[in-house]
Amino acid sequence: MKVLLLIPSVYSLANTIRKGFLSLDYNTEVYDYRNDVSGNLKNVNTQMYRLPFSVRKKWNAYFMNKINVLHRKKFDNEHPDLVLIYNNEMLLPETIAHFKKSAKVMFFLGDNPFYTPTNDYYLHLLFSADMIISPDSFWTQQLELMGIKNCTTEYFNTQHNPFTQTENVEPHDLLFVGMSYVNSWGYKRALFLSHFADMDIRIHGNSAWYRWLEFFPQLKDKFILKGRYSDEYMDLLHRNAKIYPFDSNPGVLNGIHLRLFDCIEYDMLPIPEYRKDIQDVFSKEHLPIITDYSKAKDIVQHYLDNDTERIELVQSLKSFIRNNFNPEKSLGRILSRI
């Protein structure tokens, strides 16, 4: 069996799912259309939102058609039996129909399909899927309510290539790496992290953070403006911190963010904001969960003050996710339903 993964190649998930399929003896190819679109076109596309709708509409038709030609060409060259698509990858309905003439089509929902504005066809495409993988039980329930029944809630333990440390990174107790937003989601994230402002934390993020640092000036000395970090540097940052406190994106209603699995694999203790799926999946694993922002600092401080407890808990969590959510097992459960 041959699998074509349509997914951004820079995401660790691409390598994770590819390894999972390879372990099942599936010939697997990863394709990222961004590698075949010129930088000029991508730059124009990022600025197109500034123009009137009539202009954006014509541009979107041109740009998406160009991307879909690339997707169909790759599909025709590879002749896969299964196409697994991350989010929507700018696909058009006619391209999905082309795939389905000779292959099964699966979607992995990386972002909430009801909040993702990149493709007007996103939800429409999901009705054509042979299987949809959702990391959020609420998304699954909502899709089923709409009439899409071939949807399953599933999680993947991320796979990281080991790196040899080639540069020094200053160790810190707490780490957060993530973008902010120009709407209230950004305020919520800054509010969450402000509870750790007098602790040894470093926040690596995009320029949108500056908007909210005015509301939370105690975070200014903790913030580092980042570009795209290499996998090696991300590896160093995580392995030189003890705890990763993280809020849940409001678009994730019940689900588990992949960052939780990342942290455990990096030997960090994740301390997440409450979500139903986190509590359900880790109910027997004693994972600390923040249910009240006002108590967040005390929870984190407990695990900073008790190194042995923290280290033993991380090792227990690592054993749990490797035994239950390694890519081979997760994909096996999914493929058994097609």
Image (spheres, helix red, strand yellow):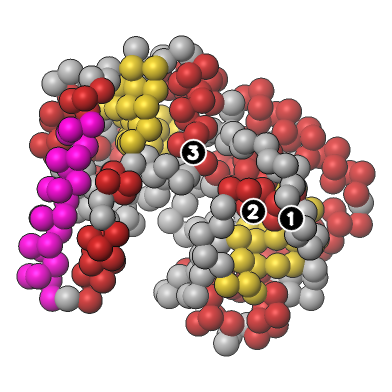
State whether residue 61 is above or below residue 133.
below
Residue beneath disc 3:
13
Q: Residue at x 51, y 70 (%)?
A: 206
For the residue pair 107 and 40, the one nearer the viewer reads as 40
Residue beneath disc 1:
167
Q: With 10 as the anchor, is 199 left or right in this view? A: right
For the residue pair 102 and 270, the one nearer the viewer reads as 102
The answer to whether any part of residue 273 appears in the image is yes
Mark 2 lies on a secondary structure that is helix
**What secondary structure is the magenta-colored segment mainly?**
helix
Q: Could you tell me the amino acid type at mark 1?
A: Glu
User: Mark 1 and mark 3: span between their CA atoms?
Assistant: 25 Å
Q: Residue at x 27, y 17 (%)?
A: 81
For the residue pair 157 and 240, the one nearer the viewer reads as 240
Q: Residue at x 84, y 46 (%)?
A: 310
> What is the x, y in percent for residue 33?
29, 44
Residue beneath disc 2:
233
Quarter that holds the N terminus: top left
> What is the x, y in percent for residue 134?
41, 37
The answer to whether any part of residue 264 appears in the image is no
Q: Earlier in the sequence, mark 1 or mark 3?
A: 3
Camera-nearest label, 1 or 2: 1
Asked whether 70 falls inside the magenta stretch, the response is yes
Q: Could you tell me the amino acid type at mark 3?
A: Leu
Q: Earlier in the sequence, mark 3 or mark 2?
A: 3
Camera-nearest label, 1 or 3: 1
Magenta region: 52-74
> What is the x, y in percent for residue 142?
34, 43
